[in-house]
């Protein structure tokens, strides 16, 4: 199995994988076209790699498409898991759209930029002044009900399996739990099974095969906040290696599934990522 990757960090240690700088896409057309897998292409490369070079990509197209925009992501969550999706209102950033939201959503509520990650582009709206500041930063109004939590879960999926999960405690601002925003890890408290089952249901039904899901628990009930296609691997010791091993196992399993000469009942041999 020969792979090319456009992400040096996430491909480091994967066997038979050639890293190509994203801006060198056009210089390596033949190599990309002949690869068994194209790993972690950038969003702007998808059209050419998928439809032009007929490349097979990882993560999946669904992981890219849904992970690129919270509006699309939330619509999919509402369709597949309506009982686990926080109440969300989405409107164009017009005076009438803003007023419709303000008249319906009780304060405090959470407002987000549709295309942001790592806890950036998130506001806790307490009053009209907060609301106006948010409106000045976006063309699309995306707001969700405020959930009474002081922590959330990060659950990592590769392929159709959960690789790991942990709690993230609130950061310095008393609002966001992202590690990049000062949140801290609690690896001792078990991850609730209900959260794991929700994540697996969403990942498998939506064909999301590489993601860090953010889940809130309220009175034992899991709520899906969002997922990040490119998630951090620093939450737990050894997490980076476990994720890479899971990627390798998944890609090899897909190769075996696609090979008509393979016996589907034959166990997959253990694979190792280079250290």
Image (cartoon, rainbow, N blue to C red):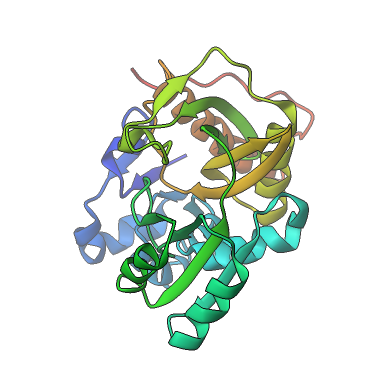
Q: Residue at x 76, y 35 (%)?
A: 264
The foreground one among 32 and 155 is 155
Figure disc tally: 0
Indicate the quadrant containing the C terminus: top left, top right, bottom left or bottom right.
top left
In the rendered structure, the answer to whether residue 218 lies left or right of residue 140 reads right
Residue most toward the top?
A: 188
Query: Can the viewer see residue 259?
Result: no
The image shows residue 29 at horizontal and vertical percentages of 30, 63
**Which image quadrant for residue 14?**
top left
Q: Considering depth in this image, is 102 or 1 the residue closer to the camera?
A: 102
Q: Is residue 218 above or below residue 99?
A: above
Residue lying at 45% horizontally and 62% vertically, measured from the top left: 68
* Residue placed most toward the observer, 220 or 156: 220
15 sits to left or right of 59: left
Q: Give the quadrant of residue 26.
A: bottom left
Question: Residue 27's spot in the image, x, y percent?
Answer: 20, 63
Q: Position of residue 17 (x, y in %)?
A: 35, 38
Instruction: Classify 267 as above or below 91.
Output: above
> Which quarter of the figure has residue 115?
bottom left
Q: Is residue 116 left or right of residue 247?
A: left
Q: Is residue 5 visible?
A: yes
């Amino acid at each position: 199995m020969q792979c090319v990757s456009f992400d040096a960090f996430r491909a480091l240690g994967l066997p038979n994988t050639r890293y190509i700088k994203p801006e060198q896409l056009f210089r390596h057309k033949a190599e990309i076209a002949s690869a068994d897998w194209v790993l972690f292409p950038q969003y702007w490369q998808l059209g050419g790699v998928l439809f032009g070079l007929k490349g097979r990509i990882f993560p999946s197209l669904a992981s890219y498409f849904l992970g690129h925009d919270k509006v699309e992501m939330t619509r999919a969550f509402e369709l597949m898991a309506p009982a686990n999706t926080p109440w969300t209102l989405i409107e164009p950033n017009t005076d009438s759209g803003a007023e419709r939201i303000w008249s319906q959503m009780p304060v405090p509520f959470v407002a987000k930029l549709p295309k942001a990650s790592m806890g950036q582009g998130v506001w806790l709206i307490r009053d009209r002044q907060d609301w106006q500041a948010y409106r000045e930063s976006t063309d699309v109004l995306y707001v969700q009900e405020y959930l009474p939590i002081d922590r959330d879960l990060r659950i990592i999926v590769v392929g159709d399996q959960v690789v790991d999960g942990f709690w993230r405690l609130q950061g310095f601002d008393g609002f966001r739990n992202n590690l990049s925003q000062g949140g801290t890890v609690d690896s001792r408290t078990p991850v609730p099974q209900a959260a794991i089952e929700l994540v697996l249901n969403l990942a498998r039904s939506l064909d999301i095969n590489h993601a860090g899901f953010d889940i809130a628990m309220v009175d034992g009930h899991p709520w899906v906040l969002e997922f990040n296609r490119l998630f951090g691997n620093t939450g737990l010791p050894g997490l980076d290696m476990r994720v890479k091993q899971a990627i390798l196992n998944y890609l090899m399993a897909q190769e075996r599934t696609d090979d008509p000469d393979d016996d589907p009942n034959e166990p997959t041999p253990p694979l190792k990522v280079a250290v």
